Amino acid sequence: VQLQASGGGLVQPGGSLRVSCVASGTIFGINRMAWYRQIPGERREVVAAITSGGSVNYADSVKGRFTISRDNAKNMVYLQMNSLKPEDTAIYYCNADVRGSPLSRFYEYWGQGTQVTVSS
C-alpha cells in the first residue's frame, strides 16, 4: 500500500489550494483518512480527519477555512484550503488506516508529504 500526495505549491495569503492523496496497492478497506502538517523542527500535527462514514474533525486553527473530503471509490482524500495564512506554511502529509487483505487488521500508512507555502 502506498499513499501519494499532490497539489502543494506557493499561494498568496488569502488564496486557496487543494491537496489530494491517493491510496494504491492491494486494498480491502480504508478506515480513517487524515491530513497532518509539520513545520521543520516542530511536531507533526493533525489538521483534519474523516472517517469512512464521512464524519469529520478539524484542528481549531483551520476550522471554517479548510474542508476535508474523500472519494471512497477512488481511495482518495482531499483537503481544500481557503483563506490561507502564512502560518499555514508547512509540509502536508496524508495518513490513512488501510486493510491490505480481507482478514487483516487496519495498518497506518503515510504519504510522502507535499509542501504548501503561503507568502506574498
Image: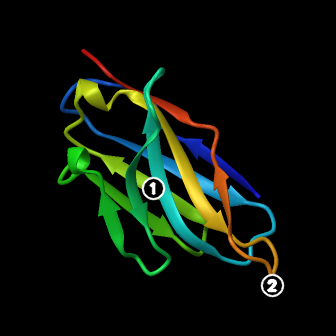
Q: How is the image coloured?
A: rainbow
**Number of numbered callouts drawn:** 2
The percent coordinates of residue 26 (x first, y second) are 81, 68
Image coords of residue 107 (percent x, y): 70, 64
Residue 86 falls in image quadrant: top left
Q: Kindly check if marks 1 and 2 are in contact, taking CB atoms under 8 A apart as contact.
A: no
Q: Is residue 96 left or right of residue 69?
A: right
| Residue plotted at (19% across, 39% down) | 83
- Residue in the picture at 56% in, 54% down: 95
Q: Which mark's residue is nearer the viewer, 1 or 2?
A: 2
Q: Amino acid at mark 2?
A: Leu
Image location of residue 41, percent across then percent down: 47, 21
Q: Quadrant of residue 67?
A: bottom left
Mark 2, secondary structure of its residue: loop
Q: Is residue 85 above or below residue 16?
A: above
Q: Which residue is mark 1?
A: 78
Please determine whether, in this image, residue 51 is positioned above or below residue 120. below
Q: Amino acid at mark 1?
A: Tyr
Dot 2: within a 10 Å radius of its alpha carbon, few (fewer than 14), some, or many (20 or more) residues? few
Of the numbered discs 1 and 2, the one sitting upstream in the chain is 1
Badge 1, how many Cα within 10 Å: few under 14, some, many 20+?
many
Rendered image quadrant of residue 45: top left
Between residue 98 and residue 13, name the one nearer to us: 98
Q: Which mark is residue 103?
A: 2
Of the pair 89 and 24, the residue shown nearer to us: 89
Left or right of residue 23: residue 65: left
Q: For the residue labelled by badge 1, is the local secondary structure a helix, a strand or a loop?
A: strand
Query: Which of the two residues, 51 or 21, is positioned nearer the viewer here?
Result: 51
